[in-house]
């Protein structure tokens, strides 16, 4: 079939070698009528129409005559090599003039709908098929056709390549002696029963979404039956599809043992639940592989592509202008970010604690580890030392760094903040699970940082950890059952970047503690957190506090602090109103009246308008620490300031509301005539 006049003007061979930086360029547009007509006589238009029809469910609710279709070219990946022709170090991809950069592109489609501000991007598109060649330089990043069933030989090659080439960063950890008493149960797929993992045997773990489906669970009443040989044989028909498929896949991978939370933790035994939840770092970190069910919204979704008729297949194969075109499927970041699995709280730690993952997404399978991300529909797995592959801008949206495993170079407090920011926007069916769903990650971090955690904050860096702040914070986001001073005590908005820590800022140098933090323990004692600053004031006995002892628990911090009431404007800062008004949160000015009665505003604070409207003009702030920062651009030296926390008091107990936006000069704070007082922060 020939091409229509508009498509004939497109030089496809050049488009698939598009210069870097041309991501998102619109090549041509169609109305639904013009596309329908031209598809009858044009190969490319016919392929575009097939793509649109494949995505018809995404366009439900849009009228055909209101649509406009756009064909775009996008950066998919870069092939980086040395101009000298020598071996290239994978970490040496900076543009220093010694490298060749070859951009590999894909064609994508988006749909504009009349009277809608945002266009609808379609997940699948078109790509150049890989040539039949043994030269890896010609085949990398080029397309592979994806069939109805996963190619298990390809999966096995991925796993083998990772084991042989990626080294320690991708090697599952060994179970340490400190967890010798931890009973890890697994499904023995040969004997079809629950067993205790023998010795240091290899096993596979499953990460999936429970959803609202009926779940077969290990309980105290069926424990004896399920641990008998072939005890699960009579239960096979009751297994959710995802677990059944995972057992099937485990066998195909020539593994014997599979860990699944529903069947390997006694679900109605609080003691077993508690110890297992605390050690998810062991369960997932020691697994030889983690199977991820990233398609669907519950445990009956299964593993698409494992068996015939389990996933939709988009088959396009056209030879146009000498270019072999086939369908392209959503890249890793796009496919996983759109999944329910990626949005759930529990699955965050299951992902980041794992060393190797096989992810079953809606359209294709991915292999993801600390060294690589591979997919069915394109060749990324080359080990050729003469070039290095890197995702293009199109393949990195909405952010490969946020979707993938934390880079193995991340460590310490930087790793902690990365994981917290990745976790807080996720959804929980039960808000009471907020700590449990992150407990395994905290156990891991506790060992790495050599410090205990107190409601999600590391004791050794307590002041720094207290400096977290949600820009879009409001009272309705409070999570009951958790302290207000911890990020666990608040539900984040779904906006990425909503949370930040004061030390994230590029000007931050050091946080100086001025408060001796103390936690009220469950036993009614007072426990010191971290190293006491010198000098520190003596705390009163708990029995001498005006707050009834029965009202205190391990949610509460007890400390001396400087407190003052500051003026907070009634109207938000006009310069910020437009940017975040849709969320009801604004930046309000904070200040004090000097000796002459003049109002001096010296910082700002993000508050929800409803909360601010209900409060008086003067609000209580406490000084929580000092900070040293680099001078502003062009200034030499450093600046010292203080951090203030807005609090509200209820029945003798204070609660965190928000931190001020910027550090404050201490001289301005002195003008407010602060006074020392004992604070109980709940």
Image (spheres, rainbow, N blue to C red):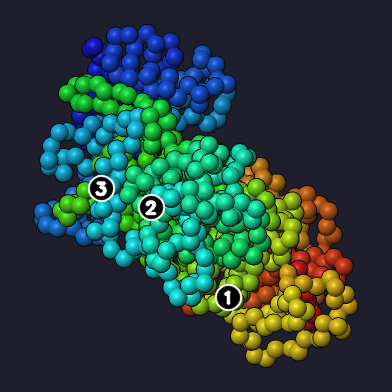
Which callout, 3 or 1, points at the residue further toward the start of the chain? 3
Q: Where the N terminus falls, by quadrant?
A: top left
Image coordinates of residue 665 in percent, x first then y, are 64, 74
Relative height, residue 72 to residue 270 (above, below) = above
Q: Report the mark closest to the observer, 2 or 1.
A: 2
Element under disc 3: helix
Circles 3 and 2, Cβ within 8 Å, touching? The answer is: no
Q: Is residue 270 left or right of residue 446?
A: right
Looking at the picture, tell me which residue is in the foreground, 128 or 272. 272
655 vs 511, left or right, is: right
Q: Badge 1, how many Cα within 10 Å: few under 14, some, many 20+?
A: some
Determine if residue 451 is in view. Answer: yes
Q: CA distance from mark 2 to mark 1?
A: 36 Å
Mark whose residue sits in front, 3 or 1: 3
Q: Which residue in the structure is indicated by mark 3?
A: 157
Q: Residue at image x 21%, y 34%?
A: 130
Q: Residue, x 13% and y 37% (percent of image)?
A: 133
Farthest-out residue, front:
229
User: Image quadrant for the C terminus?
Assistant: bottom right
Q: Quadrant of residue 285?
A: bottom left
- Residue highlighted by disc 2: 256
Please state which of residues 48 and 442 is positioned toward the viewer in this rendering.
Answer: 442
Q: Residues within 10 Å of mark 2 (few under 14, many from 20)?
A: some
Mark 3 or 2: the one toward you:
2
Q: Residues within 10 Å of mark 3 (few under 14, many from 20)?
A: few
- SS under mark 1: loop
Q: For the point 59% across and 80% down, which residue is it?
A: 512
Residue 20's x, y, as percent?
28, 42
How far apart are the two marked residues, 3 and 2, measured between alpha carbons?
Answer: 19 Å
């Amino acid at each position: 079939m020939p091409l229509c006049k508009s498509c004939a003007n497109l030089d496809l061979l050049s488009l698939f070698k598009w210069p870097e930086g041309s991501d998102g360029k619109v090549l041509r547009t169609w109305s639904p009528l013009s596309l329908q007509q031209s598809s009858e006589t044009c190969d490319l238009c016919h392929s575009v129409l097939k793509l649109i029809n494949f995505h018809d469910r995404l366009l439900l609710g849009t009228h055909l005559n209101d649509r406009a279709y756009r064909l775009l070219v996008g950066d998919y990946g870069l092939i980086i090599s040395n101009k000298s022709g020598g071996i290239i170090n994978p970490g040496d991809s900076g543009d220093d003039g010694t490298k060749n950069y070859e951009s590999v592109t894909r064609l994508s489609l988006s749909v504009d709908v009349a009277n809608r501000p945002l266009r609808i991007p379609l997940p699948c598109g078109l790509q150049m098929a890989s040539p039949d060649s043994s030269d890896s330089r010609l085949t990398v990043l080029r397309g592979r056709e994806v069939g109805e069933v996963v190619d298990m030989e390809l999966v096995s090659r991925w796993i083998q390549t990772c084991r042989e080439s990626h080294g320690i960063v991708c090697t599952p950890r060994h179970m340490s002696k400190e967890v010798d008493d931890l009973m890890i149960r697994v499904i023995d797929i040969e004997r079809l029963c629950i067993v205790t993992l023998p010795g240091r045997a290899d096993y596979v773990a499953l990460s999936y979404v429970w959803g609202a489906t009926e779940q077969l669970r290990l309980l105290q009443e069926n424990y004896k039956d399920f641990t008998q040989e072939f005890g699960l044989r009579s239960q096979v028909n009751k297994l959710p599809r995802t677990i059944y498929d995972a057992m099937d896949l485990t066998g195909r991978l020539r593994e014997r043992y599979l860990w699944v939370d529903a069947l390997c933790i006694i679900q109605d035994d609080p003691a077993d639940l508690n110890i297992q939840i605390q050690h998810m770092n062991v369960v997932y970190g020691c697994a030889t592989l983690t199977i991820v069910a990233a398609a669907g919204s519950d445990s009956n979704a299964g593993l698409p592509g494992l068996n015939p008729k389990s996933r939709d297949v988009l088959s396009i194969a056209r030879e146009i202008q000498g270019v072999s075109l086939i369908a392209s499927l959503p890249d890793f970041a796009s496919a996983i970010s759109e999944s329910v699995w990626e949005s759930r709280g529990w699955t965050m730690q299951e992902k980041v604690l794992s060393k190797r993952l096989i992810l079953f997404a809606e359209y294709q399978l991915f292999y993801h580890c600390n060294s690589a991300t591979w997919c069915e529909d394109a060749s990324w797995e080359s080990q050729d030392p003469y070039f290095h592959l890197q995702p293009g801008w199109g393949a990195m949206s909405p952010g490969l760094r946020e979707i993938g495993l934390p880079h193995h170079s991340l460590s310490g407090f930087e790793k902690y903040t990365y994981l917290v920011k990745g976790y807080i926007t996720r959804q929980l069916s039960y808000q009471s699970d907020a700590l449990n769903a992150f407990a395994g990650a905290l156990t891991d971090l506790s060992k790495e940082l050599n410090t205990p955690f107190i409601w999600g904050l590391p004791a050794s860096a307590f002041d720094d950890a207290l400096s977290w702040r949600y820009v879009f914070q409001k009272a309705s986001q409070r999570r009951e059952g958790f302290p207000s001073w911890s990020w666990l005590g608040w539900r984040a908005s779904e906006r990425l970047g909503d949370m930040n820590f004061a030390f994230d800022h590029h000007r931050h140098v050091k946080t100086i503690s001025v408060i001796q933090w103390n936690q009220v323990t469950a036993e009614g004692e007072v426990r010191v957190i971290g190293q006491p600053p010198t000098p520190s004031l003596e705390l009163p006995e708990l029995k001498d506090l005006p707050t009834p002892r029965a009202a205190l628990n391990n949610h509460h911090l007890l400390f001396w602090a400087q407190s003052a009431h500051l003026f907070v404007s009634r109207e938000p800062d006009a310069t910020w109103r437009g940017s975040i008004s849709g969320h009801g949160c604004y930046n309000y000015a904070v200040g004090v009246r000097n000796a002459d009665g003049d109002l001096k505003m010296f910082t700002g604070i993000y508050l929800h308008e409803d909360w601010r409207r209900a409060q008086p003009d003067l609000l209580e702030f406490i000084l929580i620490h000092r900070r040293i920062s680099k001078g502003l651009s062009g200034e030499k030296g450093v600046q010292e300031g203080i951090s203030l926390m807005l609090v509200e008091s209820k029945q003798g107990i204070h609660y965190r509301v928000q931190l001020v936006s910027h550090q404050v000069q201490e001289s301005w704070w002195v003008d407010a005539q602060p006074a020392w007082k004992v604070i109980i922060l709940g």
